[in-house]
Image: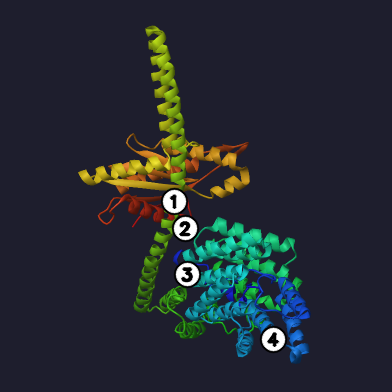
């Protein structure tokens, strides 16, 4: 089964300011293509000729679902009278899937009903595949709860029949549904489970589909470098194996990643590639995706003439969709373009239609669209000089933002708990390694003592010399072990363990004597690009230079530590948030103006900073650290090379 999923998913989340970034268009749901193996189809045995035909249909679907649809429909028409119910069910399952891939939800539902009418075995390969397709259609129609029930049933049936391929595919559908509902932390968890299954099965094409899906989720979580990297890997795989239909979808996802990053020219280039591939594949019915993307990109560039031009082209070739989310997305863009052209009547009519459609969705799923509508209403009210209404609309938008922000804090808390647990496991392994070194040192100590006893028996003078040597050796060993246990090997700063221990100690002192206490977390901007461009040894040089720069602005009682790859933490006892900000600004400026030599190249690097301080509502260091990390997260999303204070 192919879980490439429909073109209906092409525009669910729109690029927007930090909060509205969850509005990015969900370009499409690529999923995996699992070729049916004998082990996975043990419950459904078809005649040899039919099994060969089904496998051919699956291979055609690898290249283009339109070819697979035509082949399967002809197969059904030619052999309809001689097919058994299970054979017909297999064909209906595939027809429903291919129609879903091509965004024809109405015909897909017709084939789904024909499948159920045959009373099929839902634990068979075809039955599980159909459950996933049915769930995908319902998810497109905004029926998230019903869709999730089908996905979970498919997961249960796949586990019961030990069908690893479809189990991995079930995880992918579940992850996509969570992503559509803005629960990207949960989506990543299920994508990870799907990834483990695919790695075990060695399915390269399915991995490429999965990378596209994960690219979107990483983009929604603001990890742009990871999102771009995954999409490029998928595009390379599809192009190398001549899967141009799938490459078209992948470029669409990459374009949306660029839209989210405000790299609009790169997004336009990717959408142009979508149009080129649509023509190359003879799939000009899919060219509307490129036109729609260009309309959005040019609208964001305030090039309204071009935006209207491409939106008009989109409307000419686009077939009206049954998908609620696609209808909403199109109407919102139409309203935005109408407003930019001062066509207030059309914009208001579009808004009314959107509000009617939003009433059919769960509020959680439509939160980003609600926010866009409120902002557009605000702009229209200001245009009409109705400032009282504008104020009320903006107030509602801010309330929605705060509600969303509280939800996101819970997700972040869960995310950072996972990260903390991982760090704890790594730290435990490091402690075990250091324990081995200590044991080795203890054995050396015992050997030295034995030698000393021999020397004592030989002569008192030799004993004195030996004792002196032993004491010197012990002190030296102790210093080495102490440094090993508390120092980062690369930068020679305090390591994560020692920095956190020192922080806990200083925080306890601050609470006891009612003193100020603050911390700074800073992270090197675009560090992955440095490693990719100049190599990891150059990246190490850059980290050493940054450590030396920052250390110049740290006071005697402060501690500067390296707590991650390119992440640093400054502990500031008896320091207010204002003083911490001044220190952070000095470090930021010093890093920004520093000429760093990487080979024969002069490179300029910047960093983003998050600051938090001790407050009444922060019971422990973990909370202060979390607040600073969230502030860093905001600084990253505010353009980098800046400082953000925890609220």
Q: Estimate the spatial distance between the alpha carbons at disc 1 and disc 2, rounded to whole Å.
A: 10 Å
Q: Nearer the viewer, mark 3 or mark 4?
A: 4
The reply to whether discs 1 and 3 touch (Cβ–Cβ < 8 Å) is no
Q: Secondary structure at mark 1?
A: loop
Where residue 91 sits, quadrant-wise, is bottom right
Label 4 vs 2, first from the N-terminus: 4
The reply to whether discs 4 and 1 touch (Cβ–Cβ < 8 Å) is no
> Is residue 292 toward the left or the right of residue 450 in the image?
right
Q: Estimate the spatial distance between the alpha carbons at disc 1 and disc 3, rounded to whole Å.
A: 27 Å
Q: Estimate the spatial distance between the alpha carbons at disc 2 and disc 3, rounded to whole Å.
A: 18 Å
Mark 1, residue position: 642
Question: Percent position (x, y) of residue 131?
Answer: 58, 79
For the residue pair 307 and 49, the one nearer the viewer reads as: 49
Where residue 597 sits, quadrant-wise, is top right
Which quadrant does the N terminus fall into? bottom right
Q: Secondary structure at mark 4?
A: helix
Label 1 vs 2, first from the N-terminus: 2
Q: Estimate the spatial distance between the alpha carbons at disc 4 and disc 2, rounded to whole Å.
A: 52 Å
Q: Residue at x 31, y 44 (%)?
A: 504
Mark 2, residue position: 637
> Is residue 338 toward the left or the right of residue 7 in the image?
left
Question: Percent position (x, y) of residue 438?
Answer: 43, 32
Q: Nearer the viewer, mark 1 or mark 2?
A: 2
Q: Secondary structure at mark 2?
A: helix
Mark 3, residue position: 182
Label 3 vs 4, first from the N-terminus: 4
Q: Nearer the viewer, mark 2 or mark 3?
A: 3
Label 1 vs 3, first from the N-terminus: 3
């Amino acid at each position: 089964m192919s879980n490439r999923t429909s073109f209906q998913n092409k525009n669910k989340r729109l690029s927007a300011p930090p909060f509205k970034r969850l509005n990015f268009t969900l370009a499409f749901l690529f999923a995996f293509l699992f070729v049916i193996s004998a082990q996975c189809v043990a419950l459904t045995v078809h005649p040899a000729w039919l099994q060969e035909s089904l496998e051919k249909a699956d291979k055609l679907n690898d290249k283009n679902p339109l070819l697979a649809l035509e082949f399967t429909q002809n197969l059904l028409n030619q052999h309809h009278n001689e097919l058994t119910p299970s054979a017909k069910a297999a064909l209906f399952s595939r027809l429903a899937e291919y129609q879903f891939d091509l965004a024809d939800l109405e015909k897909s539902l017709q084939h789904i009903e024909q499948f159920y009418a045959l009373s099929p075995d839902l634990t068979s390969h075809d039955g599980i595949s159909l459950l996933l397709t049915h769930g995908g259609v319902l998810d497109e129609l905004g029926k998230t709860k019903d869709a999730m029930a089908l996905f979970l049933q498919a997961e249960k049936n796949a586990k019961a029949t030990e069908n690893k391929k479809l189990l991995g595919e079930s995880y992918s559908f579940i992850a996509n549904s969570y992503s559509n509902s803005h629960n990207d932390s949960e989506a990543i968890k299920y994508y990870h489970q799907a990834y483990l299954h695919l790695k075990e099965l060695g399915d390269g094409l399915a991995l490429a589909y999965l990378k596209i899906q994960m690219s979107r989720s990483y983009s929604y979580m603001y990890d742009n470098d990871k999102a771009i990297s995954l999409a490029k890997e998928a595009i390379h795989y599809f192009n190398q194996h001549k899967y141009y239909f799938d490459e078209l979808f992948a470029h669409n996802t990459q374009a949306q990643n660029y839209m989210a990053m405000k790299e609009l020219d790169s997004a336009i280039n990717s959408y142009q590639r979508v149009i080129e591939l649509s023509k190359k594949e003879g799939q000009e019915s899919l060219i509307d995706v490129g036109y729609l993307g260009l309309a959005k990109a040019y609208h964001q560039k305030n090039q309204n003439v071009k935006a209207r031009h491409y939106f008009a082209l989109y409307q000419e070739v686009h077939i009206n969709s049954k998908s609620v989310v696609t209808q909403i997305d199109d109407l919102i863009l139409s309203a935005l373009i109408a407003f930019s052209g001062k066509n207030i009547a059309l914009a208001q009519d579009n808004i009314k239609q959107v509000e009617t459609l939003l009433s059919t969705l769960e509020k959680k799923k439509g939160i980003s669209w609600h926010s866009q509508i409120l902002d557009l209403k605000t702009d229209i009210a200001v245009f009409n000089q109705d400032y009282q209404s504008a104020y009320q609309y903006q107030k509602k938008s801010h309330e929605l933002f705060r509600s969303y922000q509280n939800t996101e804090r819970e997700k972040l808390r869960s995310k950072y708990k996972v990260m903390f647990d991982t760090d704890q496991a790594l730290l435990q392994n490091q402690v075990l390694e250091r324990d081995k070194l200590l044991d080795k040192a203890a054995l050396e100590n015992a050997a030295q003592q034995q030698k000393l006893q021999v020397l004592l028996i030989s002569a008192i003078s030799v004993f004195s010399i030996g004792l002196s040597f032993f004491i010197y050796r012990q002190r030296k060993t102790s210093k080495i072990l102490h440094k090993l246990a508390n120092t980062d090997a690369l930068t020679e700063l305090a390591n994560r363990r020692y920095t956190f221990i020192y922080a806990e100690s200083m925080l306890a002192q601050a609470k006891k004597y009612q003193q100020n206490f603050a911390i700074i977390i800073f992270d090197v901007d675009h560090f992955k690009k440095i490693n990719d461009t100049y190599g990891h040894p150059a990246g190490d040089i850059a980290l050493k230079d940054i450590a030396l720069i920052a250390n110049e602005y740290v006071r005697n009682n402060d501690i500067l530590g390296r707590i991650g790859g390119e992440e640093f933490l400054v502990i500031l006892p008896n320091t207010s948030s204002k003083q911490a900000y001044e220190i952070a600004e000095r470090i930021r400026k010093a890093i920004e103006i520093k000429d760093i030599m990487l080979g024969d190249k002069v490179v300029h690097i910047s960093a983003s900073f998050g600051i938090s301080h001790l407050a009444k509502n922060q019971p422990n260091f973990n909370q202060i650290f979390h607040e600073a990390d969230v502030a860093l997260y905001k600084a990253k999303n505010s353009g980098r090379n800046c400082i953000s204070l925890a609220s």
